Image (spheres, rainbow, N blue to C red):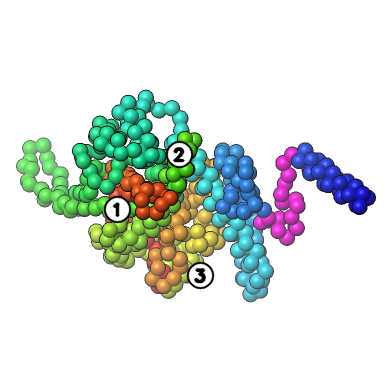
Amino acid sequence: MKIGTLVAALSVAAIACAVIAFAAVGPVDLHAWLPASDAAVGTSLAMTMMPGFNHRARGLVGVSADGANATAILAELKQTFEAFKAEREAEIKGINAKFADVVQTEKVDRINAEVTKLQKALDDVNSAMAAIRIGGGAGDAPDPAKAEHATAFNKWFRKGDRAIDADLRDLEVKASLSTLSDPDGGYVVPEEMSTTIDRVVGTVSAMRSIATAMTISTDTYKKLVNMGGAGSGWVGEKEARPETATPTLRELVFNTAEIYANPAATQTLLDDARVDIAAWLAEEVATTFAEQEGAAYISGNGVNKPRGILAYDTVANASYAWGKLGFIATGAAAAFASTDPADALISLFYSLKQGYRNGASWLTSDAVMETIRKFKDGQGNYLWAPPSGPANVATILGKPVATDDNMPALGANAFPVAFGNFSRGYLIIDRFGIRVLRDPYTNKPYVHFYTTKRVGGGVQNFEAIKLLKCST
């Protein structure tokens, strides 16, 4: 037994020395430890740096989100895309020679999927960095009224102190957080808490990042749109100026609807003074709000929710009329055309008026993005290009790409791709103030926080957005 124990101890010591020696070497090229056949794909920085892509990523490796990580991910993204192009060329040669290689196709698809993961990792890092920039840093001096309201709200949130109920109503009005003297349904959250919630939702919803968002103090926003009709003409210095036609105006109405979340916490958690209430509430409600909003901005029917871009009437772009969204056909019933599939995207690009293309972007799902990544133009150039810098996004035909898995997959009569100037084309309206109702009774020992906000959305300029439809 003593000899066995000694051998085991020496083995453990040898392993420990090996680990220390390995750590002392410094950064290691993970690809060097992979088989040659997997080196092109391997274990990417996306998988080692971002917990979403590697269940083994923990601790400092899993949570770091900074400029260095973004630069490293971008470098590997470009390297992987070059490998993708090389393997794709080999696949095309085999297809043209009527010698389809299943193994080669699988390799291309594997690398293509890795490019998608790297792009997603880069987007996540950039979103996290943007959130930090918005939430941190010194700003204007705090408003004493808002600070007083925040202090009282925090006490009420943790303890449910009835003594401050009446004070909170008055403090909301004093801090300009409410235009009503006695609103029902809980209390308006402090400004910094509202900002935290909106920021977290904004990093998840693709439409919120590309559309125009406006905060209003009522339930409805109305907007007049000039439909044209104003006449003009050339005249000489002394000639008469006849009356011209009057422009036609059309009213657009955007209504808000209520979205809610109902997170719960134990009173023990709330009693812990070190818990950041604003961050906790934002984390709890962000997923619910983001999922509900994101789906509504794409396909919502406008009934008790925003109206999504795919919920409007559509028409072939050659017959475009105001109030409908124009579309370009892919050339195939349920997918892209088998020959020259890139032509549909190029036609979609030029279907948008030049005045809107300056700020235009693409919107599609990751799955459709992987298909588009294989397309080339007539000169043999790939339509998709990796980001030009760590803080930038990938492009198609030089225009940025936003991916949202609420967009449809390829299928009969589906609209898998949208292209447009979404900041001019789609409007998101937020009713000022996020309200919280504290409920310690329904589900003891948990305290529920019924959190609501009012939000709406819809197309405000039908010329600014075009769709791609799977059809002939």
Q: Which residue is mark 1?
A: 258
Residue 136 rendering spot, x and y as whole percentages: 46, 33
- Going by the numbered disc 2, the residue's amino acid type is Asp
Determine which residue is flagged by label 2. 271
Q: Secondary structure at mark 2?
A: helix
Residue at 58% in and 41% down: 64
Picture disc at residue 339? 3
Between 244 and 228, which is closer to the camera in this rendering?
228
Report the span colored magenta: 26-42
Residue at disc 3, secondary structure: loop
Quote the CA–CA distance across marks 2 and 1: 30 Å
- Which residue occupies the foreground of this view, 284 or 312? 284
Q: Are marks 3 and 2 in contact (CB under 8 Å)?
A: no
Q: Nearer the viewer, mark 3 or mark 2?
A: 2
Residue occupying the point 34% across, 46% down: 438
Residue 472 in view in this figure: yes
Element type where label 1 sits in the image: strand
| Closer to viewer: mark 2 or mark 1 | 2
